[in-house]
Image (tube, grey):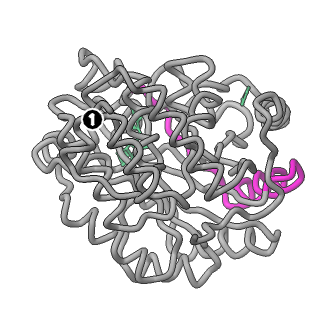
């Protein structure tokens, strides 16, 4: 049997691979369909056919960081900055609940636009709507993470972006890899469900570093892993770069599913930007979560991490109907649960 099939079988049965084995899978192409089918079987066996929806509220695009790849970076003067009032954020969450979402994800750039007590107010009010709350607001102190947790936050998303230190330092001026890992460790210790993930196709990123990223998710025992291609943004220093491919992103995701069989893995928006069936293909290759946008009005368009973002002119009601239809179309069902990780 070819080596690749041996490796895929081993991963499907033991959920463990060496770095070298992951590199073999990432580098070869012939057995990609086998890889995707194995990831789909593991997904079905461990997390079932239900797809968890998370309503994404992009509540502020103000950011103090300068990540080279991101359109919201501080030095990008082409972005019109906004931050929603606490009452507006709570209202968007109430509407999301009305559309049947059981979880909202509160995402923003990293900034001091909201005080800790503003955040506590927002979190506790949304919590009282009987919604699970995921935060995605960047690097904070442990005390701040604790305050959010005490206010009712359940989960936290903070992608490591890349575990390749050289690549990390080159793309994140003024930030440190150590502090990012410190944040993830603190969040785990505080009892959050922790999500991380990486960008695929960053300049100077190698197959070896992608293999390290996957092993990092496993070592952290991440509860959620968000993966997507890097898509060059014209308003950033990486405007001229090539960007990541859809297939390679899908492979990193599929291998991640094989190694973390019970994790929650979204079919990301960035995947759909590169392939118009991207999210459904991802759901059939290991993913079990979708994060439709529930931000209203003009703000979607102003939250431009990368170009070609989907749904910028659609309403939350439209996206909700659209995604439900697509999910039924592939023979899966929208979950009515909160969608916490169930360890198996
Ligand atoms: N292409 C793809 N994803 C991006 N992100 C930021 N900029 C880009 C880009 N140009 C991702 C980062 C971040 C998440 C919120 O968006 O991985 O963690
Ligand atoms: Fe800010 Fe996040 Fe974009 Fe970095 S990736 S510039 S922290 S919004
Ligand atoms: Fe927004 Fe399909 S999910 S239009």
Residue reaching furthest right? 98
Instruction: Assign a secondary structure to mark 1.
Output: helix
Residue reaching furthest front? 1
Compared to 91, does 21 lie above or below?
Answer: above
Relative to residue 339, is residue 42 drawn left or right?
left
From the image, tell me which residue sits under label 1: 3
Region of the chain picked out in magenta, as a range: 78-101
Query: Whole-percent x and y of residue 183?
Result: 33, 69
Query: Whole-percent x and y of residue 206?
Result: 18, 34
Q: Quadrant of residue 232?
A: top left
Relative to residue 128, is residue 150 drawn left or right?
left
Split into quadrants, the picture shows ligand 2 in the one at top left
Q: Is mark 1 within 8 Å of ligand 1?
A: no
Q: As rendered, which of 291 and 109 lies closer to the eye?
A: 291
Is residue 7 found inside the magenta-colored segment of the image?
no
Relative to residue 89, is residue 97 drawn left or right?
right
Residue at image x 27%, y 71%?
182
């Amino acid at each position: 049997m070819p080596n690749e099939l041996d490796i895929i079988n081993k991963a499907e049965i033991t959920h463990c691979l060496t770095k070298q084995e992951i590199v073999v899978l990432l580098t070869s192409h012939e057995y990609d369909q086998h890889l995707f089918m194995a990831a789909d079987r593991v997904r079905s066996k461990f997390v079932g056919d239900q797809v968890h929806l998370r309503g994404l509220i992009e509540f502020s695009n103000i950011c103090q960081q300068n990540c080279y790849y991101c359109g919201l970076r501080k030095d990008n003067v082409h972005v019109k900055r906004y931050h929603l009032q606490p009452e507006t954020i709570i209202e968007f969450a109430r509407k999301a609940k009305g559309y049947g979402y059981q979880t909202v994800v509160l995402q923003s750039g990293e900034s001091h636009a909201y005080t800790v007590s503003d955040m506590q107010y927002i979190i506790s009010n949304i919590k009282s709507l009987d919604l699970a709350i995921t935060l995605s607001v960047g690097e904070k102190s442990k005390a701040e993470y604790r305050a959010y947790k005490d206010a009712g936050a359940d989960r936290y998303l903070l992608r490591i972006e890349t575990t390749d230190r050289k690549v990390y330092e080159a793309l994140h001026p003024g930030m440190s890899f150590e502090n990012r890992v410190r944040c993830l460790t603190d969040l785990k210790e505080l009892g959050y469900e922790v999500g991380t993930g990486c960008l695929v196709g960053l300049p100077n990123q190698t197959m070896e570093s992608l293999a390290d990223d996957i092993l990092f998710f496993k070592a952290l025992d991440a509860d959620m892993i968000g993966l997507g291609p890097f898509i060059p943004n014209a308003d950033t220093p990486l405007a001229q770069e090539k960007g990541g491919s859809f297939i390679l992103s899908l492979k990193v995701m599929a291998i991640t599913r094989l190694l973390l069989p019970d994790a929650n893995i979204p079919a990301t928006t960035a995947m759909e930007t590169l392939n118009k069936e991207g999210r459904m293909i991802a759901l059939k290759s290991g993913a079990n979560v979708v994060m439709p946008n529930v931000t209203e009005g003009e703000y979607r368009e102003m939250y431009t991490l990368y170009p070609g973002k989907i749904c910028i002119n659609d309403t939350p009601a439209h996206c909700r109907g659209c995604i439900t239809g697509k999910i039924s179309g592939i023979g899966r069902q929208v979950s009515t649960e909160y969608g916490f990780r169930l360890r198996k």
